[in-house]
Image: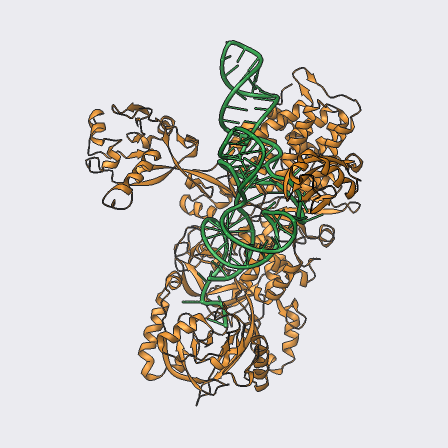
Chain colours: A orange, B green
RNA sequence: GCCGAAGUGGCGGAAUUGGUAGACGCGCACGACUCAAAAUCGUGUAUCGUAAGGUGUGUGGGUUCGAUUCCCACCUUCGGUACCA
């Protein structure tokens, strides 16, 4: 009987769904295990072969845990709010809900084909009111909470009000004043702040949505703009987010990225007095030890004292400089390596040297970090040094590094010099001593600074959660009323009014004045609702909690269910979320934990970052000039005579007919180009274009079918070494070189899989051809799960062959051949060796070597002609997590009741694995020269005697006693001569 | 610049604690079956050498009886990040 994967997979898919095989409920009699995937954004393009890699891995892990008696929560859902659906809506007018729903259906179909064991009864969709009701609810909790630094946790805003009420001035304040004051504490708060405004997208972007100064999506330019925005006070959690990392089983790379993002640095803040004035400049420094070398102060262009410090004489120049700094975009500021700055005209007093030191403004000091002012120590800081050199400022050496050759000027090593009371101290001690002195004199304190900023939480978009906020204009009655202006007070919606449903709008475009698309709905605006929506990370910051209790209408998740499931045991997802989603989720979870709403502080115990499967893009090379008359391009003319082609085919020379060159011609030409006595204008006169990989096999383009499917290539010439294709027909050159190839060869490159690069491989196609089991195992067989690699289906036949071979252990042409004979020890050994290996591999996530272990077992059993039930059935269970369909089919053929996926993973019988002998490799001076089989319990003396008897060893020892004899039991023997 | 990961046959990769480098698969070659092809099965396949033997895990050095594995320096690639004081 043949292995008919199509029928098997279709049948079992239906049965699993009918019998709810993967449905899970809380069961206190079983240990729980929570296996989670980062839920996808359902894009219109569907899944490509890269997406399922992590899902396949997590599916195997979940199935394995289930077979080992765990009650496994393994859910899936949709991160359904997002920009692509909204932009499609702007282009076509289709409501994003419709697009999103269609995309989800498509994804679901593709996923079902692969045979995942998700409990779909727990599916969540973040764009559904049932879900975002709770996103809004949590936002209100954040709004109504503050961070109590004394108890070191978030508390209800009421405890803050109690505290503030103790001060008699509090009661005297107006409602508005009180609200403004509280805004300084709320964990979700509003503030005017410079934001990253993207004009092209009409929205504000978070720092991590920006790459190289441009929007991550679309690559549009970003400018700084002051706007009133919602923020989350994540900085209150910086320390806990940092400390919590130590307890997590995440890769070091991932932890480092979060640490760098949080960017904690310890130092001191110090006041520098401006002589004869009430002003002081507060600087932040991580190197208080070097304060004796501080010879000038630099403040940011945005610093609040700029006006006060600018003297009359310097005013014009300072204003010019500030407008110069502001005119530059972030990109330009980054590219600019020139040292710039202007003297304010004022001086400050170095509190230790008592010298008057000049105050400068320079763009290398940022307004947003630290205090926006630094004490510059040119002897120990690269940038300060460059600045001092350019402006002729004094450089005082304060650290003797002669004992540390090779140390950079910024390394914290050496002995203090020229530094008053700390002279002779080591840098480490000097830092402490200076801080102590600063604190003693009351001119500063020890301080910790973070790079991390509070997280922007407003988006000028339509397709997101509405804020459950109305605005109250000061002096007016309660909502509803018109809002949106600058002095109004946000009023949170009452919890029982949630969800606040996302309204319909007349246009999905931003209103044009910087306000969100919701401003296009008059009723919405009239009711005073906030017109911004929440960012993408809102919903994804807590979805893992909702899976535990997805249908609950009274709570985001019931306490007892969270108590049962606890946090995610293993989380699979891409490394690109290191500082976005993974940081925000930890923050939200910690917050909910502080309020006693969640029973665990960290949401994700173990993290696995699957690598990306990239696409192999194919390029065709197009003649750049498109001008057929220029015979001067002698290099190409060797193969293609444009004019000849034109006249042969009666083509109008004025008509545009692009010529594409096979890349082997281009390679020839680049060789040729090197030999030319002159340079070609801009490199070689061709440019690369992506071509759909469907028409390319092994870098050879199928020109006729490409042209047949794409009318735009009609009339184009595809030149190869032997001839050319025109409208899909091949014509040879009369003088073509002997044996020249007709193949049109493409160029290739590994890139991210994407529709626009025409390099997408659809899993459906692979599954149709080889089956889902094969697809799953092949993805894993490609290499280690954490490694990125290009998709290459060359090896897929190996996995396909394996499945067929495996099938043939049960069936041959004549039919069923499984016997009830008692297996031999050798057969048992193969079985138990495999059980052990697979169990260990899954725990370590070494799925690629598991696949090879199955191949080995199948080959070995095949060689022994073993078709015995007692071997095959346990083996089948070990394979079930990897290949759920074929194993289920064979399981039922073995006359088992119920699903194999609810069976028990077999136990390893060590007795079959213990060896009494070992074949030792015998090395002479570390090089393996011989082999010898010895009993495992042999003594070193006896082994030495036997080894030295070997002819192949005697040859090296010449019969002499060895210098040394190394015997490592069960491993190796080494003879030193 | 800084932080992190990696570099092994023609290719994807294996070697889990310092102990027989190249498992498994692809590709390739040869053979069997076939009128033939496909499919399937078998054999071989790091490299130089007829062989004995030599060489070999990015490069150079070191520790060790023994190094893909540990240490030092360097090169390359990929990810992250950046006037962060």
In the rendered structure, the answer to whether residue A204 lies left or right of residue A52 reads left
Q: Quadrant of residue A299?
A: bottom left
For residue A433, above or below residue A723: below
Q: Residue at x 33, y 24 (%)?
A: A739
Name the quadrant of the C terminus of chain A: top right
Q: Residue at x 25, y 38 (%)?
A: A626
Q: Quadrant of residue A429?
A: bottom right
- From the viewer's side, name the closer residue of A116 and A390: A390
Name the quadrant of the N terminus of chain A: top right
Query: In the image, residue A64 lies at what x, y percent?
Result: 70, 40
Query: In the image, residue A413 lies at what x, y percent?
Result: 54, 72
Q: How many marks?
A: 0
Query: In the image, residue A105 lies at what x, y percent?
Result: 55, 38
Q: Residue at x 54, y 27 (%)?
A: A769
For residue A873, above or below residue A161: above
Query: In the image, residue B60 lies at what x, y percent?
Result: 50, 52
- From the viewer's side, name the closer residue of A20 and A643: A643
């Amino acid at each position: 009987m043949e292995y008919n994967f199509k029928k098997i997979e279709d049948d079992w898919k239906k049965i699993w769904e009918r019998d709810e095989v993967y449905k899970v409920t809380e069961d206190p009699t079983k240990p729980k295990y929570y296996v989670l995937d980062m839920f996808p954004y359902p894009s219109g393009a569907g899944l490509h072969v890269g997406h399922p890699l992590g899902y396949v891995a997590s599916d195997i892990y979940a199935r394995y845990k289930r077979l080992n008696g765990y009650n496994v929560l393994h859910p899936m859902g949709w991160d359904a709010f997002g920009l692509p659906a909204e932009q499609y809506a702007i282009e076509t007018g289709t409501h994003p809900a419709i697009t999103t729903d269609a995309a989800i259906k498509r994804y679901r179909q593709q996923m079902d084909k692969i045979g995942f064991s998700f409990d779909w009864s727990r599916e969540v969709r973040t764009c559904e009111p049932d879900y975002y009701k709770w996103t809004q609810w949590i936002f209100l909790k954040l709004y109504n909470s503050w961070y109590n630094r004394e108890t070191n946790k978030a508390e209800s805003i009421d405890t803050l009000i109690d505290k503030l009420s103790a001060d008699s001035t509090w009661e005297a304040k107006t409602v508005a004043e009180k609200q403004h004051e509280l805004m300084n504490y709320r964990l979700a708060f509003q503030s005017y702040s410079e934001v990253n405004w993207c004009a092209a997208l009409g929205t504000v972007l978070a720092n991590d949505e920006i790459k190289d100064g441009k929007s991550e999506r679309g690559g549009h330019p970003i400018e700084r703009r002051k706007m009133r925005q919602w923020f989350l006070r994540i900085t209150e959690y910086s320390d806990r987010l940092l400390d919590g990392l130590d307890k997590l089983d995440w890769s070091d790379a991932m932890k480092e990225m979060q640490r760098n993002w949080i960017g904690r640095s310890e130092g001191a803040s110090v006041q520098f007095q401006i002589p004869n004035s009430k002003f002081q400049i507060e600087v932040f420094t991580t190197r208080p030890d070097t304060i004796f070398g501080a010879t000038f102060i630099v403040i940011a262009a945005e610093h609040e004292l700029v006006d006060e410090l600018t003297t009359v004489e310097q005013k014009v120049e300072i204003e010019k400089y500030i407008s110069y700094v502001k005119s530059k975009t972030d990109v330009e500021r980054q590219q600019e390596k020139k040292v710039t700055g202007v003297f304010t005209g004022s001086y400050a007093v170095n509190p230790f040297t008592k010298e008057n030191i000049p105050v400068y403004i320079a763009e290398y000091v940022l307004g947003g970090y630290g205090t926006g002012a630094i004490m510059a120590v040119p002897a120990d800081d690269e940038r300060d040094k460059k600045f001092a050199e350019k402006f002729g400022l004094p450089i005082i050496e304060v650290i003797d590094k002669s004992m540390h050759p090779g140390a950079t000027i910024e390394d914290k090593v050496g002995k203090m010099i020229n530094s008053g009371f700390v002279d002779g101290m080591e840098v480490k001690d000097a830092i402490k001593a200076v801080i102590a002195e600063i604190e003693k004199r009351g001119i500063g304190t020890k301080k910790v600074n973070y790079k991390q900023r509070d997280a922007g939480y407003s988006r000028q978009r339509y397709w997101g959660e509405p804020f459950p906020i109305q605005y109250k204009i000061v002096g007016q009655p309660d909502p509803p009323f018109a809002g949106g202006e600058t002095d109004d007070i946000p009023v949170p919606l009452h919890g029982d009014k949630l969800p606040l449903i996302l309204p319909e709008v007349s246009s999905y475009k931003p209103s044009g004045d910087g306000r969100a698309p919701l401003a296009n709905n008059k009723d919405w605006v009239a009711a005073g609702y906030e017109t911004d929506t929440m960012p993408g990370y809102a919903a994804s910051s807590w979805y893992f909690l909702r899976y535990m209790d997805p249908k609950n209408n009274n709570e985001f998740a019931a306490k007892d269910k969270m108590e049962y499931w606890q946090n995610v045991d293993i989380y699979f997802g891409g490394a690109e979320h290191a500082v976005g989603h993974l940081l925000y989720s930890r923050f939200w979870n910690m917050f909910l934990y502080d309020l006693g709403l969640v029973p665990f502080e960290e949401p994700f115990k173990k993290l696995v970052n699957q690598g990306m499967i990239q696409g192999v893009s194919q390029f065709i090379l197009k003649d750049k000039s498109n001008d057929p008359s220029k015979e001067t391009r002698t290099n190409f003319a060797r193969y293609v005579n444009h004019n000849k082609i034109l006249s042969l085919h009666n083509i109008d020379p004025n008509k545009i007919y692009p010529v594409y060159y096979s890349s082997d011609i281009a390679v020839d030409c680049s060789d040729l180009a090197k030999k030319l006595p002159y340079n070609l204008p801009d490199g070689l006169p061709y440019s690369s274009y992506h071509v759909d990989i469907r028409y390319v096999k092994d870098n050879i383009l199928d020109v006729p079918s490409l042209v047949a499917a794409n009318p735009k290539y009609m009339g184009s010439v595809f030149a190869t070494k032997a001839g050319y294709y025109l409208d899909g027909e091949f014509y040879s050159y009369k003088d073509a070189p002997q044996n020249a190839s007709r193949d049109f060869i493409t160029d290739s490159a590994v890139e991210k899989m994407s529709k626009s690069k025409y390099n997408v491989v659809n899993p459906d196609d692979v599954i149709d051809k080889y089956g889902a089991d094969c697809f799953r195992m092949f993805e894993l067989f490609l290499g280690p799960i954490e490694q990125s690699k290009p998709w290459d289906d060359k090896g897929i036949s190996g996995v396909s062959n394996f499945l067929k071979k495996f099938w043939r252990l049960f069936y041959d042409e004549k039919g069923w051949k499984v016997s009830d004979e008692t297996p031999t020890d050798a057969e048992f050994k193969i079985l138990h060796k495999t059980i052990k290996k697979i169990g260990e591999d899954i725990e370590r996530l070494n799925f690629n070597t598991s696949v090879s272990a199955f191949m080995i077992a199948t080959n070995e059993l095949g060689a022994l002609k073993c078709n015995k039930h007692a071997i095959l059935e346990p083996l089948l269970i070990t394979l079930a997590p990897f290949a759920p369909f074929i194993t289920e089919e064979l399981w039922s053929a073995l006359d088992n009741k119920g699903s194999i996926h609810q069976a028990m993973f077999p136990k390893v019988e060590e007795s079959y694995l213990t060896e009494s002998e070992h074949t030792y490799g015998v090395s002479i001076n570390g090089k393996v020269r011989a082999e010898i089989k010895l009993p495992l319990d042999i003594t070193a003396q006896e082994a030495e005697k036997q080894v030295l008897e070997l002819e192949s060893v005697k040859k090296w020892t010449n019969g002499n006693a060895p210098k040394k004899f190394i015997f490592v039991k069960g491993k190796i023997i080494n003879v030193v001569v």
